[in-house]
């Protein structure tokens, strides 16, 4: 129900499907068993990811000043998923300065 933004009772557009994000980012970093669930509140997910970024910046010597907008959160959740599966690989493609390395650093921290 939370994905139906146009009120037609169906989730049938690409924009509605893009809001479907799964991950364990809502739990605290370093928790022993983090639940892999649907993140249905995007605003809460954004605040949580910004909090995780602040935790990373406190622990790391390489500070990252990132803006956690929706697409950055989506890409970070994908990289998290790849990193959590054993023996997995990912090829991140994009122009220089697009945030591939920063996204991967944050995902590895999570």
Image: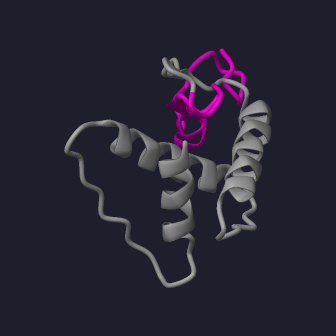
Residue lying furthest bottom: 96
Q: Is residue 69 visible?
A: no
Question: From the viewer's perspective, is residue 28 above or below residue 89?
Answer: above
| Residue drawn 48% across the image and 21% down it | 36
In this orientation, which residue lies closer to the viewer: 16 or 10? 16
Question: From the viewer's perspective, is residue 53 above or below residue 10?
Answer: below
Q: How is the image coloured?
A: one colour
| Residue drawn 70% across the image and 44% down it | 52
| Residue drawn 56% across the image and 66% down it | 102
Residue 19 among those drawn in magenta: yes
Question: From the viewer's perspective, is residue 33 above or below residue 92?
Answer: above
Q: Position of residue 109 (x, y in %)?
A: 54, 48
Q: Position of residue 75 (x, y in %)?
A: 51, 52
Residue 108 among those drawn in magenta: no
Image quarter of the C terminus: top right
Please provide the residue range marked out in magenta. Answer: 1-30
| Residue drawn 29% across the image and 36% down it | 85
């Amino acid at each position: 129900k939370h994905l139906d933004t146009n009120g037609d009772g169906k989730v049938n557009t690409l924009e509605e499907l893009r809001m479907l994000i799964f991950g364990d980012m809502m739990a605290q970093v370093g928790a022993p068993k983090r639940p892999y669930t649907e993140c249905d509140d995007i605003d809460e997910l954004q605040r949580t990811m910004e909090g995780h970024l602040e935790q990373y910046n406190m622990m790391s010597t390489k500070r990252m000043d990132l803006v956690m907008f929706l697409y950055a959160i989506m890409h970070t959740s994908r990289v998290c998923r790849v990193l959590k599966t054993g023996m997995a690989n990912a090829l991140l493609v994009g122009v220089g300065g697009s945030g591939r390395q920063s996204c991967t650093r944050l995902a590895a921290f999570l």
